[in-house]
Amino acid sequence: MIVNLVLDLVLDLRQQLNGRIIAYTVMKIVMQKVRLVEVNLSTFEDYIKELNRRQRVKIPNLEKELSRFYHRDESKKVKDLGSDFHLIVMEAAIAQGQGNGNNNDKAQKEKEKKKKKEKEKKAKKQRDEASNYDKLSILPTSQE
């Protein structure tokens, strides 16, 4: 009975050691795979950086042009808001009947002039944007 108990303990110990060895081996393999993935990821990152560098060499001022277009559009929006505010104030003054009829005629003429100028600005903006898009359409499409 004591011999059987000792044999059972020895077998349990061997199985535990065997389990630990298997787990250690699996862990070792997993760590190797993780290292391989890290190496591949760093290689891929270097490749992407190189592609970005080449694209910047091909199109050196693209970011500057895009930011210039963005800022120009933002400033136009602010100017348009200012003219809209002026028109709203004029309409409110007319609606309240402030001033005599002569002032109302002047305000109406001024309002029409503003609308005409805005239409001209929009038409010019569309022409400018069309010419700018034509300039941007010559971007290189092939990769080296």
Image (cartoon, helix red, strand yellow):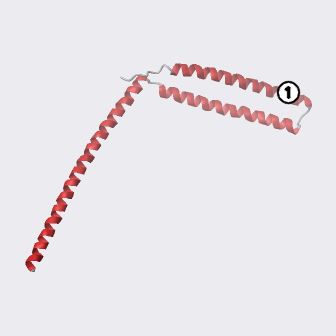
Q: Residue at x 55, y 28 (%)?
A: 68
Q: Position of residue 10 (x, y in %)?
A: 11, 70
Q: Residue at x 77, y 33 (%)?
A: 87
Outermost right residue? 100
Q: Quadrant of the N terminus?
A: bottom left
Q: Quadrant of the C terminus?
A: top left
Of 117 and 98, the residue lying toward us: 117
Q: From the viewer's perspective, is 57 left or right of 31? A: right
Q: Residue at x 41, y 27 (%)?
A: 56
Q: Which residue is mark 1?
A: 106
Q: Position of residue 94 (x, y in %)?
A: 85, 35
Q: Position of residue 108 (x, y in %)?
A: 84, 28
Q: Amino acid at mark 1?
A: Lys
Q: Secondary structure at mark 1?
A: helix
The answer to whether residue 35 is above or below residue 141 is below
Mark 1 crowdedness (10 Å alpha carbons): few <14, some 14-19, many ≥20:
few
Of 44 and 76, the residue lying toward us: 44
Asked where in the image residue 81 lies, by quadrant, the reply is: top right
